[in-house]
Amino acid sequence: MLRNLTFAMRVLLTAALALFFLRCAAYPDEVIIPDPAAEYAEGFTIHFFREKLWFYALGILELFVLLGSQRNRVWFLGVLPVFIGALLLWPVLAAHRPELVHATHSYQEDMLTIGLIRMAIYVAIASIIRLVLAHYFFPAYKEDPEASGEVDASVLDSLQARTVQEIAANPSRPDPHFLFGEADMERVTGFRAIIRRYFLRKRVRVAILCVLLALSAGWFFLYPQPTEEEALQRDLAAMYATRTLPGGYTVATGAAVHAAYRVMDYISRHEVFAGMTPQQAEEWLQLDRVPAAYRRQLRDERDIDLPSVDSLFESRDRFLTVTDGRRICVLYIRTDAEGDRINIAEVQDAGWDAVADDNRRRYGRDFERDRLR
């Protein structure tokens, strides 16, 4: 009982470490948040591990599996369900929460997609090592009965001892017995039945495996994905979800701020607001369904200082701002001389990666300084 409980605990801990490895491989910025100050900090900090965090998590996983018996069973029962579950979850997230599957910004890694690729490579290599190389280089030791030194008791019986001449004159040979008749046919029939059952079980297992693989492939490749227009409507419905901070301040949810950025990026790329009035743009954004207090917060037009851009030389108006308290995306507009019609809409983000924000701000300052020389 204790042995089974220990085995089950090892499998569960292996699965937990596999999940941690997948998280580190897919979302390292959520485990160790990027910090520009860490680049200039002296001495050893936790940010030293950030670049290869997934590699260290993999080392911890393998080290834990090696500490104990039945290592292969523990690894397969702990790692494979996590990997298969993540594969089956991928198309669902791609359809409903794309920010978890693909990077929202170019300076981010490709989220769960990259994590699954890394985990697939790891699973393939580890499986080959465990199922092929380990058995080849470290075969299970089996003692040869003939080399074990064991001798039949009749050979050592002193009462039946024979001289060399007697053995040479009358050597002992096994007397084969061949049975014919009905008894032999029964044995043959039974043997054939055993063989048929064996191959039947094998075919059933292969068929079940093929069906499961086909269903999994169908789920992965045929799960319905939204078109660009459907994705836009999904994001418009999700971008106004809110939560309340302990101090009573209302902010967007994490999913909402990602959805808002995708909507703003769509507006910028397709020039949706070109020629619209601000009132028409508000109607397009469906701001009428947002509570009045939160709508005023979203439409706040006061100047704001973003850590990713220096707006000192910009002549644009803040039109829509969505933030979850850490990440922020702002839709800016440029209007005609009368201020009645929108000419250009562009999106600016900050808070996803503090290091990328600092680099972009520095680059913008250098560009403006060189332009004004």
Image: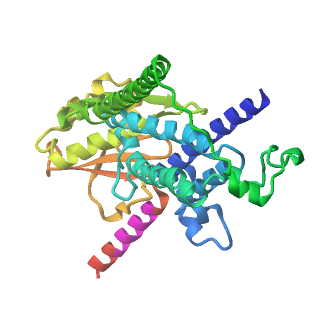
Q: Is residue 109 positioned above or below 221 on the image?
A: below
Residue in the foreground of this view, choosing between 229 and 18: 18
Q: Which residues are magenta?
A: 356-366
- Name the spot of residue 110 as percent of width and height, x first: 37, 52
Which color mode does the image show?
rainbow
Residue in the foreground of this view, choosing between 166 and 91: 166
- Name the spot of residue 346 as percent of width and height, x first: 25, 51
- Name the spot of residue 248 as percent of width and height, x first: 56, 30
Q: Is residue 321 positioned above or below 311 on the image?
A: above
Farthest right residue?
158
Screen quadrant of the C terminus: bottom left
- Name the spot of residue 181 as percent of width and height, x first: 46, 20
Q: Where on the picture, by quarter, is residue 95?
A: top left
Residue in the picture at 37% in, 26% down: 208
> In the drawing, does residue 370 fall left or right of residue 168?
left
Helix, strand or loop: magenta stretch: helix
Residue in the foreground of this view, choosing between 22 and 357: 22
